[in-house]
Image: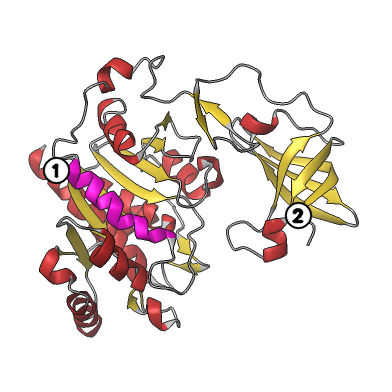
Amino acid sequence: MTVLREGKVVEVVHSADDLIRATVAVDSEVVASVGWPAMLGPLAAGDRVVVNMVGIGLRLGTGGEAFILWNLDGVGPSSEPAGHIVKLRYTPWQIPVAAVEAPESPHHEALADAVSLEGMPVVVCSLHSQVGAAAAGIKAPAPHARVGYLMTDGGALPLAWSEQVRALKAAALIDDTCTVGHAFGGDLEAINVFSGLVALKVVARVNAIVAALGPGIVGTSTALGFTGMEQGQLLDAVTALGGHSIACLRLSFADDRPRHRGVSRHSLMALSIAAREPTDIVVPKLPPARRDEVIRQLDDAGICRRHRLVFASGSDGLRLLEERDIQVESMGRSATDVPELFAAAAAAGGVAGASIATTG
């Protein structure tokens, strides 16, 4: 499979500051393509471009489009760097960002000695598709709360790739975003998870945070070889910073793969091995037999002895998603197909939101 191909832009379908969508003629086919203006610069019909076709060749669920690497006829991106901190370091696509912690940042002084979340609730998901339900879960009992989204670099790196986050911001369910590690494109750019969490509190002044990787989780059918393992590490980071860590379970009774039946093995591994500090694990309202199955799985993995189980409904958050006309899905399954997956996220958000509503 040839990965890099030259083509010609047929039409610019969508153009924004953070994302460009176009159709590109490559040999005898026309392919849907995406580009990032910060790396690419402007694009116009007729421009000759080089595209990466690997997502199409591998038929990736979250990457099945061509990605435009550069424009052979364009002027390129702005020559003015946003800042001196570089993401995607030492790759051909390295990009300078205005990191919130950097000395030239207007927020540098405020963050210089900031090391605490001061009890702020943080919901940590193992799937990007759960972010919306978790945010709505927070807003349902605490409608005036400001909610931040911390996106790690465990999945997609450009935040603009997430149509869900775009919709959640438009619906006022997420107020501010922060991209950490090599992820980029958030309202705030941060160097790591710890500083990103604190930056959302200190700079964005959010009242609660939803943390998760971007779209595109990687799995290998092995116990430890998946990106969702970071959930445990994120929960520990929240605890280390004095925050209220809340784990969102990956649940499914629609998945025919045994390792994802009930509580996904991904959740079991992240919470039993990666999460070293006690955390709140939220179990949503389920039919009795399924609830018992979930508790048994958690108990068999030793999770009940090390962490705290919290039971919550999740229905208010799911109702708010519907009211705001936000459609959520995971691997092609809607909230109707796999209600427990999104109920788990909404319930975890509801626990966070209730703590805000109680403390004011």
Rendered residue at 14%/35% (across/down): 118
Nearer the observer: mark 1 or 2; the answer is 2
What is the x, y in percent for residue 214? 46, 50
Q: Are marks 1 and 2 in contact (CB under 8 Å)?
A: no
**Picture quadrant of residue 284:** bottom left
The front one of 285 and 262 is 262
For residue 160, side relative to residue 72 (left or right): left
Q: Residues within 10 Å of mark 2 (few under 14, many from 20)?
A: few
Is residue 20 shown in magenta? Answer: no
Q: Is residue 126 visible?
A: no
Q: Amino acid at mark 1?
A: Ala
Measured in 3D between alpha carbons, the distance from the residue under mark 1 to the one under mark 2, in whole angstroms, is: 51 Å
The numbered disc on residue 248 is none
Q: Position of residue 207 (x, y in %)?
A: 23, 36
Say left or right for 308 vs 272: left
Q: In terms of depth relative to the viewer, which is nearer, 206 or 111?
A: 111
Q: Which residues are magenta?
A: 227-240
Seen at 82% across and 49% down, the residue is 5
Amino acid type for the residue under numbered disc 2? Val
| Residue 3 disc label | 2
Residue matched to label 1: 357
Give me the residue at 36% from left, 80% from top: 261
Magenta-colored segment: predominant secondary structure:
helix
Q: Is residue 207 above or below residue 228?
A: above
Q: Residue 238: x and y, percent? A: 22, 45
Q: What's the residue at 18%, 54% (across, down)?
A: 351
Residue 157: tell me if it is visible. Answer: yes
| Disc 2, SS | loop
